[in-house]
Image: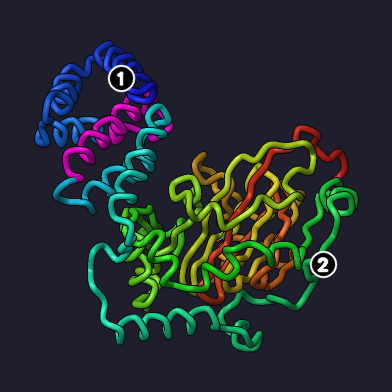
Amino acid sequence: MASAGVEGEADRVAALLREITGEGGFAFVASAEKAAAGAGDLRAAEAAREMAWEQLHSGPWNEVGAAWRDAYALACLHVARLRAGGDRPAAVKALDMGLIMGGNLLRADLEAALARISSAEPCGCGGGGREEGAGAVDEEDRRWREGLDRNRDIADALKILPAKSLSSKKVERRSHISLEEFICNYFLCESPVIIGGTIDHWPARTKWKDIKYLKKIAGDRTVPVEVGKNYVCSDWKQELITFSQFLERMWSTGCPSNLTYLAQHPLFEQIKELSEDLMVPDYCYAGGGELQSLNAWFGPHGTVTPLHHDPHHNILAQVLGRKYIRLYPASISEDLYPHTETMLSNTSQVDLDNMDLKEFPRAENLEFMDCVLEEGELLYIPPKWWHYVRSLSTSFSVSFWWRATVEPSGGS
Ligand SMILES: O=C(O)CCC(=O)C(=O)O
């Protein structure tokens, strides 16, 4: 007798295939059915995945229909099932791709398939099946620690920071403040603050310092990364690579055009074990709000997130390493020359690392506040506040974005 889970999946798949048929996706449906029948047909599964992939790339991402995203996830499930026996890395990759690019309908099925594959291979080889000698591991460990230790000396950091950094108003630093105090003194008046001493108990604070732990948990998982100086540069691109490959790039990063940043990715939805190492800070419940997203920002020293603003309240938790952050209030937006194209309208045209004052004269003498966010600290960034972020060392931050149901009435 089929279990409730299997029955549930069968019903959802049948409804999905009817919807895809309704959209004219007859070839996809025929291939998906062939992939699912009997012992399964890998070529049909791959063909279905290819067809769904083409649909995902047929126009702007926000215009891709939910059904085709679900169809992509279904094809990934078939590919993974048919590959699991002989090619475990390919099966894991197919499931990760389903989680990253697919819709929500079959998410639980993708997660269950990943759990089955992991339990069949309890060693969690992590390095994509590659054996590593003790020497290579020691060298990796040494580079990892060196990366985390960079730019502890502010004089060194100042050499690579934008002009006027750390010379004017600093973001206020507080320790262990209560939720009430956070609400009264910062949230309601939309004022940034650094809060120390509240995430020392997170397992992430100790576990993620160990590169072997991160590789064991996530090494063979596929993740999206950004490659290039920053997202406004013309040669910037996105890639999908394994976490182990990403770590290797971290050691070899030399020139800005190869800088690889695992940025703004909901990693903790994808890799559940890592989410167990964190807790949502109580401050994120200010305003009776709901968490909108929890994103990972993990990369080597030198990553830059250009000056931009977001619509949500944000607690940025600095789990490993340190970052320089500069903040401008929402009220001076016009003087920061936002890009005019819709996609970039929350991003300033002003490049703080290379300011063109002839083109953007109003940006010259604007007041800002800044800080070096140290390991173990949280930074509250109110909605619409402009922020520029540069990593000074290997750095792993987690952002908690939430929308308040009771919005502060005051603010800047
Ligand atoms: O850490 C970064 O590079 C950027 C973080 C950010 O922009 C955010 O949390 O909204």
The residue sitting at the front extreme is 1
Residue 334 in sight here? no
Q: Report the magenta residues as a range.
A: 55-84
Name the residue located 16 percent from the left edge and 33 percent from the top edge.
45
233 left or right of 38? right
Picture coordinates of residue 104, whole percent (x, y)? 43, 30
Residue under label 1 = 10
Give the amino acid at mark 2.
Ser
The coloring applied to the image is: rainbow
Which residue appears at 46% of the width and 56% of the height? 232
Identify the secondary structure beneath mark 1: helix
Residue at which label 2 appears = 175
Q: Residue at x 14, y 23 (%)?
A: 37
Q: Position of residue 312 (x, y in %)?
A: 67, 43
Let me know if residue 329 appears in the view: yes
Q: In terms of secondary structure, what is the magenta stretch mainly?
A: helix
